[in-house]
Image (cartoon, grey):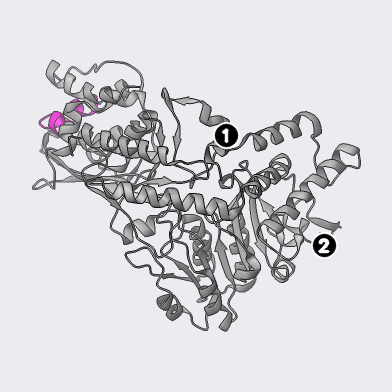
Amino acid sequence: MDVNEIKSQFPIFSKKINGKSLVYLDSSNSSQKPISVINRLNNFYKNEFSNIGRSIHSLAVNATNKFEETRVSVKNFINAKFKEEIIFTKNATEAINLVATTFGQQNIKEGDEIIITELEHHSNYVPWHFLRENKKAIIKFAPINNDGDIIIEELQKLVTSKTKIIAVTHLSNVTGTIVPIKEIVEIARKKNIPVLVDGCQSAPHIKIDVLDLDCDFYAFSGHKVYGPTGVGILYAKRKWLEKLPPYIGGGAMISEVKKNKITYAPLPEKYEAGTMPTAEVITFNESIKFMESIGINNLMKHEKEITDYALEKLKKINSVKIIGNPKNKAGVISFTIKGIHPHDIATILDEDGVAIRAGHHCCQIFHEKMNLTATARASIGVYNTKDDIDILCKAIKNCQKIFDLK
Amino acid sequence: MDLKELYQDIILEHGKSPRNLGKCEGYNHDAKGYNPLCGDKVHIYLKLDNKKKVESLTFEGEGCAISLASASIMTELVNGKSFDEAKDIMSSFLNMIKNTSEIKSNHLDDDQKTKLMSLSGVKQFPMRVKCATLSWHTFVSALEGKKKEVNTEQID
């Protein structure tokens, strides 16, 4: 894989930020977009725009076909069995809310238990908290160790006859921990408990195979996979989508509407009410093509090389502490520098054109567990180079110079 | 944007060694402030005497250099001021951050105004303005005896 050729596909890298070349290390937050994706969105609005599924004119037929083509691409991308198992939402957060709400409505009653973990992003905690508030469900947190790995034996101990669902991230957005989903699914299967996987961070970086994982639900966002904002994906086993009630009501999700009776549309429309982000979903197909043009194995190999290089270089800088040391780690590196608050780090790095994130990264449970209020986070995308890491390290040293810490 | 404007020596120095840190003895007002975006926290402890004069003002907190320096400088400048003077200093500080390029309060001398102006660098960094204002809003909350925690996302 030629990283410079890949980088040249992203117009943003030819722009100057604060007079400097951009070193973008915030891909866990959202990725930059290749020109093919930008052009697709532009072209759709310019030459092909129509809403889908309603009208029968040529533009509508074309848009509907293209929209469904993305669904098939997503199905293949994550190796799902049926295209009806792919539901488009506005983001992964909405996808998880869809499951929590509909599953909760049908299957959760007072005293029932939901297992999540201390690694979860707020978007895989708050939707379940609503069930704690509204249905008096109990949320149990599977603990992590200091390395940032979920202690699987402890998770297993939390399972009881009242456990109704296990919701867990595939890849931590703080420590980069790659979670052994298959082990968790195996535990859940023994008791017939469904498993939801938050795949936001994994979808852009590791191979996703929902059949192999055998999870019941898998959620991710298009904008982290080099795609446009406004596209979330929920994969759910067909049996669940058929069984669960609809989520948002309105046009397109109905079959027949009478004054005294409404029937719902078949899958996947049952879960896609109202006008969808048509242009964005159609554009997302280009993002998948972009990922496929690189090949997931090449991409993983490249990102591992950059991550290992970054870890090695960062560890050599005095007072830099890397948070977590998981068994399997992807390119998400959270760190602290003694004597400098992460927000000061982020501001100073930004002046050198280095974009990182600082804060709790929507993981307050994790930070509290680790006794941290905030961390700085450098996260790697397919376009990052060893040069980017060198500039990051130089900027960190500049930071220490400003704060007179060497 | 200029980093040196933001991280002036006085800011770095106060950030590293904040003054008036901890709980002051016999405090009769206190308030908590929180910035949910970054997790910065401040707890203001205030002792007003029977004429509503600030007898002592201290704070506990976690945060960036800007937020710690701002709290530290505030405690220095507001100590010994009357209720109305303290409120006037607070509003002229916030006015400087938001609108003007000077501190208009009559209750500070020129050296004190210069010290306060060292925080003006945040004006060029919109994401950092709340770091500088959190402790001030929290102080007013303590002064006015409000019970609710100050949240930077619910104030200007």
Q: Which segment did they paint magenta?
A: B74-88
1 or 2: tag closer to the N-terminus: 1
* Quadrant of the image occupied by residue B34: top left
Neighbour class for label 2 at 10 Å: few (<14), some, many (≥20)?
Answer: few
**Relative to A400, residue A134 above or below:** below
Residue A261 at x, y = what percent?
83, 62
The secondary structure type at the circle numbered 1 is loop
Left of B142 or right of it: where is A122?
right
**Relative to A167, residue A23 above or below:** above
Tell me, yes or no, if residue A251 can be seen here.
Answer: no
Q: Main secondary structure of the magenta part?
A: helix
Q: Which residue is mark 2?
A: A263
Q: Nearer the viewer, residue B51 or A277?
A: A277
Left of A166 or right of it: where is A75?
right
The secondary structure type at the circle numbered 2 is strand
Circles 1 and 2 on the same subunit:
yes
Q: What amino acid is at disc 2? A: Thr
Q: Nearer the viewer, residue A295 or B151?
A: A295
Q: Residue at 69% of width from left, 32% of height from top?
A: A39
Q: CA distance from mark 1 to mark 2?
A: 46 Å
Furthest-front residue in this view: A2
* Quadrant of the image occupied by residue B55: top left
Q: Which residue is mark 1?
A: A10
Residue A83 at x, y = what percent?
76, 60
Q: What amino acid is at disc 1? A: Phe
Q: Residue at 18% of width from left, 25% of height from top?
A: B85
Q: Please tell me whether mark 1 or mark 2 is closer to you in this view.
A: 1
Left of B119 or right of it: where is A264?
right
